[in-house]
Image (cartoon, helix red, strand yellow):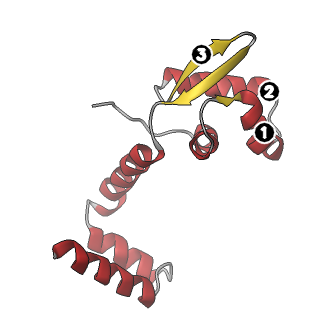
Amino acid sequence: MKTIKKLPDAEFDIMKVVWVNEPPITTNTIMQQLGKEREWKAQTVISLMLRLVKRGFLRTEKKGKERTYFPIISREEYLKFETGDFMERFHENSFTSLVATLYDGDKIKDSDLDRLEKWLKERRD
């Protein structure tokens, strides 16, 4: 099994762009969809993408002068890791604690709880 580590915000933002686009991805794609908004220079994007290659999130191939990137870790794999880490660190793996925190903080509505209850019943059947 791959060891996944938490990504810094900037690298996570790049991965979100990678995950919503059809591979291969280029630095141009990242610049068009994120770089201008973040006011990053092309070299910054290249450096961040190479870090993602080193961390095992992307693989890269060189086509002529251009480098292309392919995701190795899927969005689902990363979200599963992040969610598990969050649950362990902040809620001691207690789903009840998570829901209570969301409910008490007005982040979850009664209708959300109703849908959750329905989903749980469907899983049991």
**Which of the marked residues, 2 or 1, is nearer the chain's N terminus?**
1
Which residue corresponds to the image point at 43% horizontal and 44% vertical from the top-left? 78
Location of mark 3 (residue): 61
Q: Amino acid at mark 1?
A: Gly
Which residue corresponds to the image point at 61% horizontal and 29% vertical from the top-left? 24
Image coordinates of residue 70 in percent, x first then y, are 55, 28
* Residue 65 falls in image quadrant: top right
Image coordinates of residue 53 in percent, x first then y, are 53, 23
CB contact under 8 Å: marks 2 and 1: yes
**Which of the marked residues, 2 or 3, is nearer the chain's N terminus?**
2
Within-10-Å neighbours for mark 3: few <14, some 14–19, many 20+? few
Location of mark 1 (residue): 35
Give the number of callouts: 3
Q: Is residue 3 above or below residue 74?
A: above
* Residue 113 falls in image quadrant: bottom left
Which residue corresponds to the image point at 83% horizontal and 40% vertical from the top-left? 39
Location of mark 2 (residue): 42
**Which of the marked residues, 3 or 1, is nearer the chain's N terminus?**
1
The residue lying furthest to the left in this view is 125
Q: Give the label, 2 or 3, closer to the camera.
A: 3
